Image: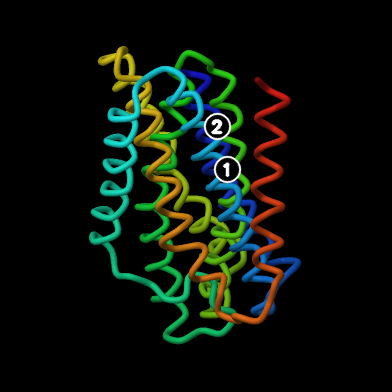
Amino acid sequence: MRIALLASLLAGLATGFGGALIALFPKLSRGLYDTLLGFSAGVMLAAGSITLLGPALRQNGVGSIAAGLLCGALLVFLLERLVPHLEPHFAPELTGPGKRLGLLMAAALTIHHVPEGLAVGVSFAGPAPQLGIIVASAVALQNIPEGLAVAMPLRAAGFSRPRAILWAASSGMAQPLAAALGVWLVALVGPMVPFALAVAAGAMIFVASDQLIPESRQQPGKKAPSLGLIAGFLLVAVLTKLCT
């Protein structure tokens, strides 16, 4: 439990690191944003399919895993209904009041971090705890551009740099709480670990498919988002191979 909480806390704080990048990148081009989104999508897809779904399939039947995937996707779908839908997530130009956009972004990402935190907790509580390190690392990587997405509009609206970074960091604090819930649930229903892994995988794959990939295709002719996706997927695949 303590290792899972620490790993999820560090992953959540990666949003603060992303927010701190406003000191280096006060404004990013659309192309670079789309590449970062593609990279995040690749990380999420690999973490869900290779790191979580693979071990689940080796432990249980297809029916249970399919049910878990659907439940994970449904969880994210329902969570997204709780906050306004923001388009696009990584806009280089503000489309509304910067303060409101940044605060709504922080609220939306806080909600989205719940299934990610659950994935970290479940992976640590499973039969191969080293998978938790991989999932936490993957979540941290994709949290960095999200933190930047929170901090940039707040900074543009007049927030001080430390305050914008603080808001970015705080948006990731839902992850350790959700990780603790994931560990507790697995401890409560140990035989359902493969199902829980599939739920976490479904949540991560749904986020990549429903949010990150479509958002990265704002310039259809550009190939950088696809290359970013491959890079993110390959990175997590190599981490999984090295750690298992």
Residue 37 — which label? none
Q: Residue at x 69, y 27 (%)?
A: 241
Query: Up-down: is 58 above or below 205?
Result: above
| Image coordinates for residue 186, horizontal then vertical, percent | 33, 19
Q: Residues within 10 Å of mark 2 (few under 14, many from 20)?
A: many
Q: Residue at x 72, y 52 (%)?
A: 231
Tell me the quarter of the picture where residue 191 sits.
top left
Tell me the quarter of the picture where residue 77 sits.
bottom left
Q: Residue at x 53, y 47 (%)?
A: 45
SS at circle 1: helix
What's the amino acid at mark 2? Thr
Tell me the quarter of the picture where residue 69 sits.
top left
Q: Are marks 1 and 2 in contact (CB under 8 Å)?
A: yes
| Image coordinates for residue 66, horizontal then vertical, percent | 32, 36
The one of 5 and 31 positioned closer to us in this rendering: 31
What's the amino acid at mark 1? Ala
Q: Alpha-carbon distance for marks 1 and 2?
A: 7 Å
> Pointer 2: what residue?
51
Is 73 on the left-hand or right-hand side of 149? left
The one of 45 and 145 positioned closer to us in this rendering: 45
Q: Residues within 10 Å of mark 1 (few under 14, many from 20)?
A: many
SS at circle 2: helix
Q: Residue at x 69, y 61 (%)?
A: 21
| Image coordinates for residue 165, horizontal then vertical, percent | 57, 59
| Image coordinates for residue 80, horizontal then vertical, percent | 30, 59
Query: Up-down: is 137 above or below 213?
Result: above
> Pointer 1: what residue?
46
Task: Give the number of callouts.
Answer: 2
Image quarter (top left, top right, bottom left or bottom right) of the C terminus: top right
Image quarter (top left, top right, bottom left or bottom right) of the N terminus: top left
